[in-house]
Amino acid sequence: MTEFSNRNGEKHRIYPRWIDKMAFSKAHKELLVRLYGKQITRREYDSLVNQLYVSETKGISK
């Protein structure tokens, strides 16, 4: 989804490197990439991150 290969088979990202550093999970990284690609709005992103954070913290407390 977020990578492509050139003729030599080398993989390249189609998003900035800071997304890898900022993301706290694979799902969060996918949301950041979608936000960066303008596939979702900031409001949608915020709502989805809140849902994701609540589900992740519930999993930790159990």
Image (cartoon, rainbow, N blue to C red):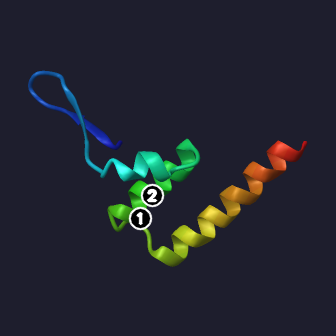
Q: How many marks?
A: 2
Is the C-beta separation of discs 1 and 2 under 8 Å?
yes
The residue lying furthest to the top in this view is 8
Element marked by disc 2? helix
The residue pinned by badge 1 equals: 35
Residue at the spot x=29%, y=38% of the render?
Answer: 3
* Badge 1 element: helix
Query: Amino acid type of disc 1?
Result: Leu
Density class for disc 2 (Cα within 10 Å; few <14, some 14-19, many ≥20) is many
Q: Callout 2, which amino acid?
A: Leu
- Residue 21 in percent (x, y) is at 45, 47
Q: Residues within 10 Å of mark 1 (few under 14, many from 20)?
A: some
From the viewer's perspective, tell me whether residue 46 is left or right of residue 14. Answer: right
Q: Position of residue 25 (x, y in %)?
A: 58, 45
Image quadrant assignment for residue 9 = top left
Q: Residue at x 60, y 64 (%)?
A: 48
x and y, in percent, of residue 49 in the image: 61, 62
Q: CA distance from mark 1 to mark 2?
A: 5 Å
Q: 51 left or right of 11?
A: right
* Whether residue 44 is situated above or below residue 34 in the rendered picture: below
Q: Residue at x 53, y 78 (%)?
A: 43
Q: Quadrant of the C terminus?
A: top right
- Disc on res. 27: none
In this view, the residue in front, 38 or 22, is 22
Residue beneath label 2, please?
32
Q: Residue furthest right?
A: 62
Q: Is 37 positioned to the left or the right of 56 in the image?
A: left
Q: Is residue 8 above or below residue 35?
A: above
Q: Could you say which quadrant of the image residue 40 lies in? A: bottom left
Quadrant of the drawing holding the N terminus = top left
Residue at the image point whose x is 30% and y is 51% from the top: 15
- Furthest-bottom residue in view? 43
